[in-house]
């Protein structure tokens, strides 16, 4: 039995993770901007569930939530940084305020929660951090450039964090889901840029806008199965650095790897020509 600390737990993948963890007998600290949203999602509120208010951009509240978790359950074994925000639009179209808003939640909010919970894990000398990225954290797509950039940041943070925390008995995994049938494409999670430029309307960005609207609630991925897969990976005791979820994510990652491999081979000679001559000679 482990203690799971899950952000954005009132809906979407966070709610599925909370439900599955409880079903398996784990304790769950389920956080959301409003604790009553968790209570509404889980009206029976079993003893193993602790709803806690948490706006991930509020550092004081993050520390209070971590303290509440330890006060109730004595420890935290798994931190899941699930809370997130989407932004759809061409890179040029997005305003400074729109970009900052998505970074506040997806990057700075994640870091705020890590800073609040990592000291608990370090004291224990054991634990697991699961950071929700996206296949868009590995493969960029038109219309998702700013969102992609936040998830690329999560990938880099997670990769370094895994190396930093490994000697302390703490593992870090970054999860890369494809399209899952949640409310992520609803206006409650996905924000559309206010400014739309005509030059992008008929190209890849406009096509992506149309696709996002057409696949909403018809995405191929099953979020209940995704939650089970994440918990399976953690419970295995050997969770990977990166965990893709969904066939679409697997295919996209494979395609990106093949493209990088091909370009690396094509441009290797030029790339290696930039070393100092004494280095190349050695």
Image (tube, rainbow, N blue to C red):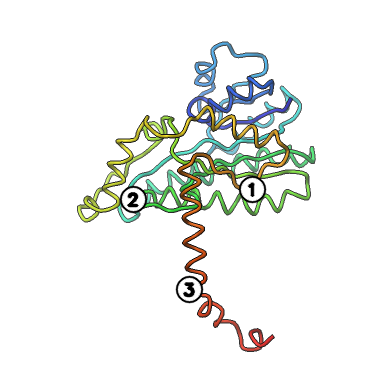
In this rendering, the label closer to the viewer, 3 or 1: 3
Could you say whether the residue bearing mark 2 is in a helix, strand or loop?
A: loop
Residue 123, position in %: x, y?
A: 79, 39
Q: Pointer 3: what residue?
A: 266
Q: CA distance from mark 3 to mark 1?
A: 28 Å
Seen at 69% across and 85% down, the residue is: 282
**What residue do we see at 54% from left, 33% from top?**
226
- Find residue 183 and report its image quarter: top left
Q: Are marks 3 and 1 in contact (CB under 8 Å)?
A: no
State the residue at coordinates (55%, 49%): 154
Place residue 186 in its image quadrant. top left
Looking at the image, tell me whether mark 2 or mark 3 is earlier in sequence order. 2
Q: Dot 2: few (<14), some (14–19), or many (≥20) neighbours within 10 Å?
A: many
Q: Earlier in the sequence, mark 1 or mark 2?
A: 2
Around disc 3, counting alpha carbons within 10 Å, would you say few (fewer than 14), some (14 to 19), or many (20 or more)? few
**Which residue is nearer to you in this view: 231 or 100?**
231
273 versus 58 height, above or below:
below
Whether label 2 touches label 3, CB < 8 Å: no
Q: Gap between marks 1 and 2, in whole Å?
A: 31 Å
Instruction: Work out how far the residue at label 2 is from the one at label 3, CA to CA, in angstroms.
Output: 34 Å
Residue underneath mark 2: 94
Residue 255 percent across, percent down from the top left? 46, 55
Q: Which residue is mark 1?
A: 241
Picture mark count: 3
Q: Residues within 10 Å of mark 1 (few under 14, many from 20)?
A: some
Where in the figure is residue 25, as x and y percent of width and height?
69, 20
């Amino acid at each position: 039995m482990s203690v799971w600390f899950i952000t954005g737990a009132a809906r979407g993948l966070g709610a599925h993770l909370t439900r599955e963890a409880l079903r398996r007998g784990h304790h769950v600290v389920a956080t959301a901007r409003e604790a009553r949203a968790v209570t509404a999602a889980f009206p029976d509120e079993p003893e193993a569930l602790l709803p806690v208010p948490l706006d991930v951009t509020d550092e004081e509240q993050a520390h209070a939530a971590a303290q509440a978790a330890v006060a109730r359950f004595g420890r935290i074994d798994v931190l899941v940084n699930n809370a997130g925000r989407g932004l759809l639009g061409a890179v040029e179209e997005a305003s400074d305020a729109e970009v900052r808003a998505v970074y506040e939640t997806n990057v700075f909010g994640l870091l705020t929660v890590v800073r609040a919970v990592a000291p608990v894990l370090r004291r224990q000398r054991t634990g697991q951090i699961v950071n929700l990225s996206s296949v868009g954290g590995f493969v960029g797509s038109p219309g998702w450039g700013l969102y992609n950039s936040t998830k690329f940041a999560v990938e880099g943070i997670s990769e370094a964090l895994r190396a930093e925390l490994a000697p302390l008995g703490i593992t870090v995994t970054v999860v890369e889901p494809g399209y899952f049938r949640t409310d992520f494409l609803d206006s409650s999670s996905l924000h559309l840029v206010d400014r739309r430029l005509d030059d992008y309307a008929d190209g890849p960005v406009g096509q992506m806008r149309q696709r996002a609207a057409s696949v909403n609630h018809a995405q191929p991925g099953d979020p209940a199965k995704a939650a089970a897969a994440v918990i399976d990976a953690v419970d295995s005791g050997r969770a990977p650095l990166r965990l893709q979820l969904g066939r679409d994510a697997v295919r996209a990652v494979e395609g990106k790897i093949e493209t990088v491999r091909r370009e690396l081979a094509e441009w290797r000679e030029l790339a290696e020509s930039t070393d100092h001559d004494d280095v190349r000679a050695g």
